[in-house]
Amino acid sequence: MANTWWELKILCDPDLEDSIFWRLEGFGCRGTASESKGNSSLVKAYLPHFQAQLLDLSALSLWLRQDALCIGLASPLLHWNLIDEEDWASSWKQYWQPQEIGDRFLINPAWLPLPESLERLVIRLDPGVAFGTGNHATTQLCLESLEMRLSEVPEAFLAKSDQKQPLVIADIGCGSGILSIGAVLLGVEKAYAVDTDPLAVQSTLSNRALNDINPECLIPTLGSVDILTKLISQPVDGIVCNILADVIIELLPEMKAITKATTWGIFSGILLEQSKAVADALEQNGWVVATLWKRKEWCCLNARRS
């Protein structure tokens, strides 16, 4: 049964999609996809069989109903069944199509041909079992924030010799590596990508190769901020951190060791109702929140060191 997966199918109101994706990620689901079914959405998610029992799935169904009730929407319908690994590998991918994000990015599934016109920066991606396909609002907000932040790089980092200073960032909770890859395509010289999930590190390594990125420019490593303090020789210029609000708050004191006076930060994975708690924690740890960008019930905080 080690290669058997739970396939979860959730019929829901389209406005529930983002909260359902968030709940499924927290539950441990590996791949997610959605499609329209008339006026409803059908969300599919996949979970290794050994990670959940029937009672766990029943609890998930209850949480989803409670989430809908809090928002004032109709309860979603959850069904599940077991499938083998080959069916899982091909099932969710058929619903994932190329997606434009911001003004410059195009996320292109690795198993589809590249578009004829390459006017955008193309990120070829096979997330495997890691979070980060570009479909989730938090990933989109982070990529758009990187685009905005790094479009200012040429002016902000020009030295007296008119040579652009190399930028180094840390991607904390890298998932599929999508944010690190995006940053490198935008001109960052080096991205240190860390994640506590070994499957995420492997996914980032695979996607680095898919995008022909020099291994010296993108360095995936198992671990968190404590590992970064050993990897980097000097503080980083920027931090991207798309994880959960509670984890961000927990890690902020440790981030002081890898930042300097000019370091900027992009923090997401934050529900709107959690934004004040995260903003307060940022300020308590020497950050100033410059902007809050939101999409549906999610937000992204752009900050700088005070």
Image: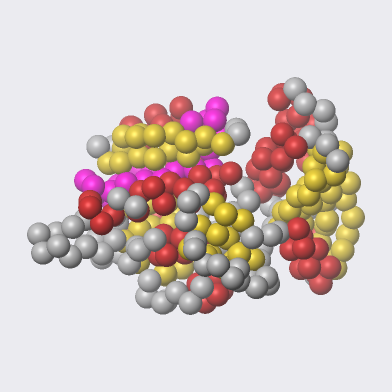
Q: Quadrant of the C terminus?
A: top left
Image coordinates for residue 283, horizontal then vertical, percent:
33, 32
Magenta span contains residue 270: yes
* 130 vs 96, nearest the viewer: 96
Image coordinates for residue 297, horizontal then vertical, percent:
60, 33
Q: Which residues are magenta?
A: 252-275
Image coordinates for residue 209, horizontal then vertical, percent:
52, 77
Magenta span contains residue 144: no
* 4 vs 56, nearest the viewer: 4
Image coordinates for residue 282, horizontal then vertical, percent:
37, 36
Q: Residue at x 14, y 62 (%)?
A: 162
* Rendered view: 262 above or below 114: above
Q: Residue at x 66, y 63 (%)?
A: 129
Can the viewer see residue 87 in this picture? yes
Q: Quadrant of the N terminus?
A: bottom right
Q: Residue at x 83, y 37 (%)?
A: 39
